[in-house]
Image: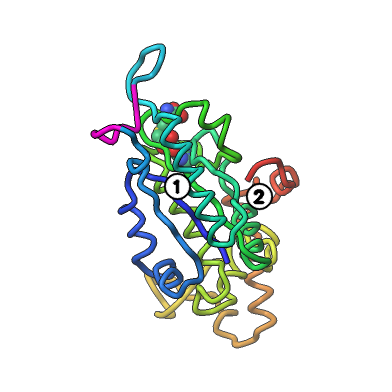
């Protein structure tokens, strides 16, 4: 079982994840627990202030260490009460290592081995006070080398990627194995092969003959080759050993 505790100023954004499609169904069926925590509940003044101006000046606001720390400590107590060992505290951050399928797969594996949880903090504004990061945060995860206005979309991307790989989440169990980056799929961490459906001819181009042959071995062979070609063309970096070796971080 996997549980996610999300610290955010915009819990309602997560309706996009918990209310729709595969992820919504998995939440309804209890394959995953997603707990949302409003950071303002840990503010101390009547205005529910959780941010302040940066020391040293400059534009924007910084999320204060106090409410964030209190939120994380309260969540850890809740996790313990629910029978989970408090999991790593993660801050979504453009300074983190880009999220990869291997990180997702590790969480899925842990969820199959027992009870596991993650506390995910979504930043806003200019970011969060460094002392919160130094004192409470175990890992920084980035959606990629670009800047979002908040960590929510990045957190939802991670949750979606984990949830769809939980046993029972997808209709066909095979579809999560035979896809891009799947270490255990046909391509050992390469891209997916091209897909075709009806009609047989579209825009003057017909489906590759082999896919109509009904010959399973030849089809599997074609798909392996097509996946490799696609990877060579679109993501040659995935074929170099350096990108496949596991580095520290996600
Ligand atoms: N001042 C920061 C950007 C802050 S953006 C900088 O220049 O790096 C506000 C929040 O959005 C961040 O605290 C983080 O939680 C989230 N965020 C922005 N880009 C992100 C990314 N690529 N991956 C994950 N989270 C991101």
Element assignment for label 1: helix
> What stretch of residues is rendered in magenta?
45-52
Q: Is the residue indicated by label 1 positioned so its CB lies within 8 Å of ligand 1?
A: yes
- Residue 185 is covered by the magenta coloring: no
Q: Quadrant of ligand 1?
A: top left
Q: What residue lies at 49% left-to-right and 47% top-to-bottom? A: 120
Give the residue number, with chain letter if any, for mark 2. 238
Measured as percent of width and height from the top left, residue 250 is found at 63, 46
Which numbered disc, 1 or 2, marks the residue closer to the eye? 1
Measured as percent of width and height from the top left, residue 208 is found at 54, 75
In-front residue for pair 61/232? 61
Q: What residue lies at 38% left-to-right and 26% top-to-bottom? A: 62
Q: Would residue 134 appear left or right of 157 to someone viewing this image? A: right
In-front residue for pair 199/124? 124
Measured as percent of width and height from the top left, residue 35 is found at 43, 57
Magenta stretch, main secondary structure, is loop
Give the residue number, with chain letter if any, for mark 1. 154
Element assignment for label 2: helix
Q: In the rendered view, tell whether residue 188 sits above or below residue 235.
A: below
Task: Count neighbours of disc 2 (C-alpha within 10 A) and say few if under 14, some if 14 to 19, many if 20 or more.
Answer: some
The outermost residue toward the left is: 47
Q: What residue lies at 28% left-to-right and 32% top-to-bottom? A: 45
């Amino acid at each position: 079982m996997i549980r996610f505790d999300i610290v955010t100023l915009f819990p309602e954004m997560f309706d996009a994840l918990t209310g729709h499609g595969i992820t919504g169904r998995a939440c309804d069926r209890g394959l995953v627990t997603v707990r949302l925590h409003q950071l303002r509940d840990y503010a101390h003044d009547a205005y529910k202030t959780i941010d302040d101006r940066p020391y040293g000046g400059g534009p924007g606001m910084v999320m204060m260490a106090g409410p964030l720390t209190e939120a994380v400590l309260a969540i850890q107590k809740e996790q313990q009460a629910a029978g989970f060992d408090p999991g790593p505290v993660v801050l979504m951050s453009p300074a983190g290592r880009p999220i990869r399928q291997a990180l997702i797969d590790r969480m899925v594996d842990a969820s199959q081995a027992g009870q596991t949880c993650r506390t995910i903090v979504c930043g806003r504004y200019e970011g969060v006070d460094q002392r919160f990061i130094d004192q409470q945060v175990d890992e920084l995860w980035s959606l990629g080398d670009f800047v979002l206005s908040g960590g929510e979309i990045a957190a939802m991307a991670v949750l979606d990627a984990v949830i769809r790989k939980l046993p029972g989440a997808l209709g066909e169990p095979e579809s999560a194995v035979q896809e891009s980056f799947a270490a255990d799929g046909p391509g050992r961490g390469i891209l997916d092969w091209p897909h075709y459906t009806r009609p047989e001819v579209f825009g003057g181009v017909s489906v590759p003959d082999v896919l109509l042959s009904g010959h399973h071995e030849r089809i599997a062979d074609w798909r392996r080759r097509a996946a490799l070609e696609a990877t060579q063309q679109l993501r040659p970096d995935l074929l170099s050993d350096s990108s496949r070796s596991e580095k520290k971080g996600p």
